[in-house]
Image: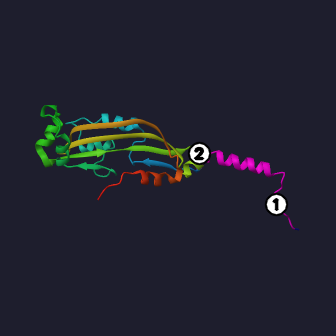
Amino acid sequence: MVVKVGMNKQNLPYIVVFMTALIFSGCASLLPRTTTVTNSPWKTYQEVLYAFDNVAPHKSTVTDIKKLGFNIYSTSNLKVLSYVDIAVATSSLKREGLGNGIEACLKVRYLCTGYVFEPQIANSNRYGNFWLDTFNFKRKTRQSGWKFRASFLIVDAVVVEKFWYGEPLIDLDQEVVNPLGPFQEIGNFLSAPKIAL
């Protein structure tokens, strides 16, 4: 038995409608998504802020802050600051503007070390029309998540100073429109100012 499969002229309008709907639906689920998670014991901004608040300068030890999640020996993505880094970072501050912990750190010089923890959860999702995005006519990106930076100055295994910076709720939308689509980069290159040699 042979079954002939062909395009029926009566079905043509339905196929055209289906294809048009597919093209203009955006196919948003096919657009790229990125998630960045710094491995840490904290899953939320509030958790890391609570841990940071429980660190007491001139009292908390390296062992104490390790119990709170700030492990200077095994935390991934940890930044270590030397005495020189700390001196340069505070060079623009007036002497009377320095805290006791910074003064103590600068006084002992190389016996002071800084540690910077930067836990974060960052999501970046492209959304909108799949075809406009693919051919670089219009790209929409939504960023969400949170970031926290905790810095500690440590002398003789004791925290002498702490600093923090945070972004508790990241919610950004970016839209980039390129009228020339895939040829936009060529246009930008041709319009760039020429450097005389």
Residue sticking out furthest to the bottom: 1
| On screen, residue 74 above or below 48 | below
Q: Is residue 14 rendered magenta in the image?
A: yes
Residue 155 visible? The answer is: no
Q: In this view, does 152 lie to the left or right of 172?
A: left
| On screen, residue 157 above or below 3 | above
Which amino acid type corresponds to the residue marked 1 in the rendered image? Gly
Quadrant of residue 54 in the image? top left
Secondary structure category for the residue under label 2: loop
Residue drawn at the location 44% of the way across and 51% of the way down: 188
Q: Name the residue under label 1.
A: 6
Residue sticking out furthest to the top: 96
Which amino acid type corresponds to the residue marked 2 in the rendered image? Asn
Along the viewing direction, whichever of 29 and 151 lies nearer the viewer: 29
Along the viewing direction, whichever of 136 and 157 lies nearer the viewer: 136
Q: Earlier in the sequence, mark 1 or mark 2?
A: 1
**Span colored in magenta:** 2-29
